[in-house]
Image (spheres, grey):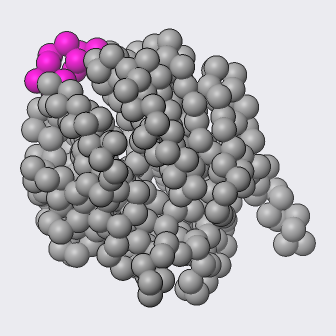
């Protein structure tokens, strides 16, 4: 059995508690319709945690289907360009489906089968979670519906095509901002009307308990591997670990293994967008305030009346007005530092990594890379900065070309 799943949250410093709280954050704020389904999910997850066959099945899938462990890669030319600390990349982009999302969808698909549910729904922003859910459902023979904001359908067309190829039905959401938060709204509505037969494979460490815990635990494989790889290859832990944060699943998975290592600096990078003005960014931890969104109490972008605010990011996966409750807990305790990165800085980092390393990162990841590049330039050469390269960027190529054509 893996350590984090045998003892859920054991390396994070916060379990959560029996009510699904990370300090004051988390919990459940849902209609009565969903309470029984969430209780069932929690009970089934606890049962799975104690089941050696569940662990063996998931470990085999992660190894033979996903291709884990993902590599630890020294970005030598990028480090030389920065002239300071050494940048290492945890290559989640080389996983099957091209991102970290598959780690969670396979685990939750197994839970779906254990619960006897016959149908899966999901939300997606950048499309990576949608593709990963469609992949898991195709593998297990489960019908799949993916809700996706109409704006994200436009800017992530390759992933929409891939989901359909694997048999998923993609339902464009035309309400609100037509992005990730609206896709979650529609998925929640579907779940409430079909809860007896449907499992909602939520894609990030957001939503009502037990989702933030479950998704973190399935993504904790990233941090466990990275920590072991650093000790084996470098003989030490990194000085800093950097990951992008939208809802925050790749960052939670990466940070969880290092939370107890006080000497390791942890940096989460949010979407700073066009400016610090409301509606121009998606930096909930930097500019938001505590509130309730999608069934959980966490930092949220909201107005004085508590209404969820408009957000923006050129990255569809970071274009979300909230964040996972455990990230809110880590912010308030000071264990993790959260910083915004603007659209232009992310695009510059995308170019720099492509030209120096031959790697096209996802636009989400480019935000983390921008911060890592800035850190590396200011640190001595004997320091190590580890970045979670959460996904690949071929999905973003057409949107980047459009943005540059528009700017000309």
Q: Nearer the viewer, residue 308 or 6?
A: 308
* Residue 153 vertical placement versus 321 (above, below): above
Residue at (76, 57) in percent of width and height: 400
Q: Quadrant of residue 2?
A: top left
Q: x, y percentage for residue 311?
A: 58, 71
For the N terminus, which image quadrant? Answer: top left
Q: Nearer the viewer, residue 322 or 258?
A: 322
Q: Nearer the viewer, residue 187 or 5?
A: 187
Q: Nearer the viewer, residue 276 or 112?
A: 112
Residue at (62, 25) in percent of width and height: 168
Q: Which residues are magenta?
A: 48-58
Q: Quadrant of residue 59?
A: top left
Q: x, y percentage for residue 16?
A: 15, 53
- Decide whether residue 302 is among the magenta residues: no
Residue at (88, 64) in percent of width and height: 405
Q: Is residue 233 visible?
A: no
Q: x, y percentage for residue 171?
A: 66, 38
- Decide whether residue 55 is among the magenta residues: yes
Left or right, residue 384 beside residue 237: right
Q: Is residue 334 visible?
A: yes
Q: Quadrant of residue 170?
A: top right
* Residue 298 vertical placement versus 295 (above, below): below
Residue at (46, 13) in percent of width and height: 140
For the C terminus, which image quadrant? Answer: bottom right
Judged by its main secondary structure, the magenta piece is helix
Q: x, y percentage for residue 404?
A: 82, 65
């Amino acid at each position: 059995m893996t350590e984090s799943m045998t003892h859920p949250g054991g390396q994070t410093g916060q379990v959560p508690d029996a009510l699904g709280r990370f300090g004051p954050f988390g919990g459940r704020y849902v209609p009565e319709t969903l309470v029984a389904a969430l209780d069932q999910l929690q009970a089934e997850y606890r049962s799975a945690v104690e089941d050696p066959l569940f662990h063996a099945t998931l470990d085999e899938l992660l190894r033979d289907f996903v291709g884990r462990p993902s590599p630890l890669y020294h970005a030598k030319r990028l480090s030389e360009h920065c002239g300071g600390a050494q940048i290492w990349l945890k290559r989640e982009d080389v996983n099957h489906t091209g991102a970290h999302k598959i780690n969670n969808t396979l685990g939750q698909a197994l839970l779906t089968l254990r619960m006897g549910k016959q149908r899966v729904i999901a939300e997606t922003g950048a499309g990576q979670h949608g593709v990963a859910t469609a992949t898991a459902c195709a593998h297990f023979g489960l019908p799949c519906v993916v809700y996706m904001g109409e704006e994200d359908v436009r800017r992530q067309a390759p992933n929409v095509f891939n989901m359909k190829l694997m048999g998923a039905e993609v339902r464009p959401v035309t309400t609100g901002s037509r992005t990730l938060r609206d896709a979650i709204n529609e998925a929640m509505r579907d779940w409430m009307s079909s809860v007896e037969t449907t499992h909602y494979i939520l894609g990030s460490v957001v939503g009502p308990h037990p989702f933030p815990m479950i998704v973190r635990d399935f993504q904790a494989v990233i941090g466990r591997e990275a920590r072991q790889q650093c000790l084996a290859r470098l003989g030490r832990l990194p000085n800093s670990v950097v990951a992008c944060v939208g809802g925050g699943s790749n960052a939670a998975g990466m940070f969880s293994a290092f939370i107890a290592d006080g000497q390791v600096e942890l940096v989460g990078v949010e979407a700073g967008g066009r400016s610090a003005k409301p509606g121009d960014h998606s930096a909930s931890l930097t500019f938001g305030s505590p509130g309730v969104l999608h069934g959980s109490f966490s930092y949220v972008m909201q107005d004085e009346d508590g209404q969820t605010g408009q957000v923006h990011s050129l990255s569809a996966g970071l274009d979300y007005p909230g964040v996972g409750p455990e990230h809110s807990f880590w912010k308030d305790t000071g264990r993790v530092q959260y910083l915004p990165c603007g659209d232009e800085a992310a695009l510059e980092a995308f170019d720099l990594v492509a030209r120096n390393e031959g790697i096209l990162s996802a636009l989400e990841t480019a935000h983390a890379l921008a911060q890592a590049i800035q850190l590396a330039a200011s640190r001595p050469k004997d320091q190590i900065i580890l970045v979670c390269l959460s996904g690949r960027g071929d999905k973003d190529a057409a949107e980047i070309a459009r943005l540059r054509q528009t700017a000309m």
